[in-house]
């Protein structure tokens, strides 16, 4: 029958009041942690930057092949097989051996238990392919190997990008994978996009190497430029220390020279290597190289065994802060290229908010007027339910501190329409029941009961569509499907608990009255 127990009335009232209070936290500040939550505005509402980054995996492949070439040479040297003309070109490793050793080389590469390279175990079916063409072995990464390298680079790059952005303190960044070599970065409310682009565009590959004036360096030398000039100098290819050995880096003010420096601390292994290098290299210049350019090349005056030091290079405090941030977050596994960039200004974001609010108000007012004119007092009950339904929906989004976007507002507007549709189905069914049933209580109860199947079917199919959109879609589609999905649950609750409760109260007091609806 059309009846609500006191416990159910209490339950509905408490839930409604709670979400009304939570929703109001977006307008007022409370001391309670639960009630001090707010909905975050998306990029299209508060402005900010959108960056699509693409990972350049060519250096990664080259580095892997460089490591493999060293391993190949050492491995076959131990087996008394001389490797001839070992070289890398076009992302392939080429080498030759004498005819009597060719089959042995193939067997070594195709043997899963071979220690030809511990990083490429079972490479025959996974990472590496080897063929012999014109007496020359060609080794390259297989399609599966390329996919694994890209996935690994993307995972590492994603984590480092997240660290760099978190260090800056950007509010609610959205950092997502796109394919297997792209990363999407959305930064709502960002007021300095150039700084972010500069930080994300740097690999931050830090090395310490000796300046070498001799071409007889056993490791080889290369010419590198200084960051702040076109001057070049010869630097040894031997890496004394890399950024992997850094524990911390912070901007500091050098009291003696009154210049801004970056102070760094090394781990135990790095401190040991640094101490040994500075003890044997007193009088030499130690080049500090970042992304292939020399920051500074101080002369070593004494042994540095403390595991800490300073990097100077005419920094401003901002550039020193950014360099320290890059070093703390770690080097990217591969360079990142910005292939798409959009910036939404705060004025445009505010225009979007105003347009969304106006659309919501217009739609809501038209629906309220139509329902009230059509169903009179029950239209008023529906309108009250719609308002509470919005409080429920916004309250849930507030509790989870969800990010609201323009498509999310569209989902809220659609929720209003679906809530009205459910009430229309119920009231029209009640009208049909009143034609054959004179008892108002029975007619209203039958109307709610017999319309339930149609309402559930409509909402369940919409919910399934929302779930598919959420898992298969991205960005704005997810925002739309999330608010729509939550709106379906709040609609069913408001229709079958709140609206029905108000209907029970009114019908119970007017059960003898004819023409209620």
Image (cartoon, rainbow, N blue to C red):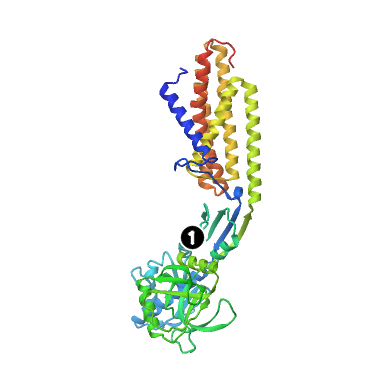
Helix, strand or loop under label 1: helix
Q: Is residue 373 left or right of residue 240?
A: right
Q: Which residue is mark 1?
A: 167
> Could one spot residue 458 in this view of the protein?
no
| Residue pictured at 55% horizontal, 40% vertical | 27
| Residue pictured at 56% horizontal, 14% vertical | 434
Kindly indicate the quadrant of the structure image that contains residue 512: top right
> Could one spot residue 361 in this view of the protein?
yes
Q: Quadrant of the N terminus?
A: top left
Q: From the top left corner, tell me how far across and down residue 497 is, in percent.
A: 48, 26
Q: Is residue 96 left or right of residue 370?
A: left
Q: Is residue 146 above or below residue 84?
A: above
Foreground residue, 55 or 120? 55
Foreground residue, 98 or 426? 426
Q: Quadrant of the C terminus?
A: top right
Q: From the top left corner, tell me how far across and down residue 468 is, in percent.
A: 52, 43
Foreground residue, 101 or 35? 35
Foreground residue, 179 or 406? 406
Q: Is residue 254 above or below residue 159?
A: below
Q: From the top left corner, tell me how far across and down residue 211 is, in percent.
A: 48, 84
Number of residue marks: 1
| Residue pictured at 57% horizontal, 38% vertical | 412
Q: From the top left corner, tell me how far across and down residue 487 is, in percent.
A: 53, 36
Neighbour class for label 1 at 10 Å: few (<14), some, many (≥20)?
some
Q: Is residue 129 above or below residue 74?
A: above
């Amino acid at each position: 029958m059309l009846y609500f127990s006191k416990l159910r009335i209490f339950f509905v009232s408490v839930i409604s009041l709670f979400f009304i209070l939570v929703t109001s936290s977006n307008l007022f500040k409370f001391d309670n942690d639960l009630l001090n939550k707010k909905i975050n505005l998306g990029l299209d509402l508060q402005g900010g930057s959108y960056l699509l980054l693409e990972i350049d995996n060519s250096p990664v492949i080259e580095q892997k092949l460089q490591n493999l070439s060293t391993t190949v040479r050492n491995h076959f040297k131990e087996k008394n097989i001389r490797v001839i003309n070992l070289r890398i070109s076009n992302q392939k490793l080429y080498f030759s051996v004498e005819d009597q050793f060719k089959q042995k080389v193939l067997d070594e590469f195709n043997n899963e238990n071979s220690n030809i390279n511990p990083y490429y175990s079972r490479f025959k079916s996974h990472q590496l392919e080897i063929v012999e063409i014109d007496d020359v072995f060609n080794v390259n990464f297989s399609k599966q190997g390329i996919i694994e390298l890209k996935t690994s680079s993307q995972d590492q790059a994603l984590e480092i990008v997240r660290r760099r952005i978190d260090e800056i303190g950007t509010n609610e960044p959205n950092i997502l994978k796109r394919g297997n070599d792209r990363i999407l970065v959305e930064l709502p409310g960002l007021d300095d996009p150039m700084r972010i682009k500069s930080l994300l565009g740097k690999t931050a590959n830090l090395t310490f190497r000796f300046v070498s004036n001799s071409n007889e360096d056993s490791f080889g030398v290369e010419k590198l430029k200084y960051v702040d000039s076109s001057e070049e100098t010869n630097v040894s290819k031997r890496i004394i220390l890399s950024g992997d050995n850094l524990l911390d880096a912070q901007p500091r003010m050098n009291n003696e020279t009154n210049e801004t420096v970056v102070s760094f601390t090394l781990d135990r292994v790095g401190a040991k290597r640094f101490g040994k290098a500075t003890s044997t290299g007193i009088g030499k210049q130690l080049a500090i190289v970042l992304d292939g350019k020399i920051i500074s090349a101080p002369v070593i005056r004494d042994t540095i065994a403390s595991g800490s030091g300073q990097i100077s290079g005419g920094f401003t405090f901002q550039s020193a802060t950014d360099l320290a941030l890059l070093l703390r977050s770690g080097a990217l596994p591969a360079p990142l290229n910005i292939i798409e960039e959009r910036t939404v200004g705060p004025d445009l974001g505010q225009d979007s908010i105003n347009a969304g609010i106006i659309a919501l108000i217009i739609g809501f007012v038209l629906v309220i007027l139509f329902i009230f004119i059509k169903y009179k007092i029950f239209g008023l009950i529906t309108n009250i339910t719609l308002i509470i339904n919005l409080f429920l929906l916004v309250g849930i989004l507030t509790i989870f501190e969800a990010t609201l976007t323009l498509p999310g507002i569209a989902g809220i507007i659609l929720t209003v329409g679906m809530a009205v549709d459910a009430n229309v189905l119920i009231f029209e069914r009640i009208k049909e029941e009143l034609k054959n049933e004179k008892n108002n209580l029975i007619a209203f109860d039958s109307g709610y009961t017999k319309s339930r199947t149609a309402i559930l079917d409509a909402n369940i199919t919409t919910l399934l569509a929302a779930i598919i959109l959420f898992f298969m879609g991205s960005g704005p589609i997810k925002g739309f499907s999330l608010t729509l999905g939550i709106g379906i649950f709040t609609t069913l609750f408001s229709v079958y608990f709140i609206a029905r409760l108000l209907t029970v109260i009114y019908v119970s007091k007017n059960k003898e009255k004819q023409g209620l609806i």
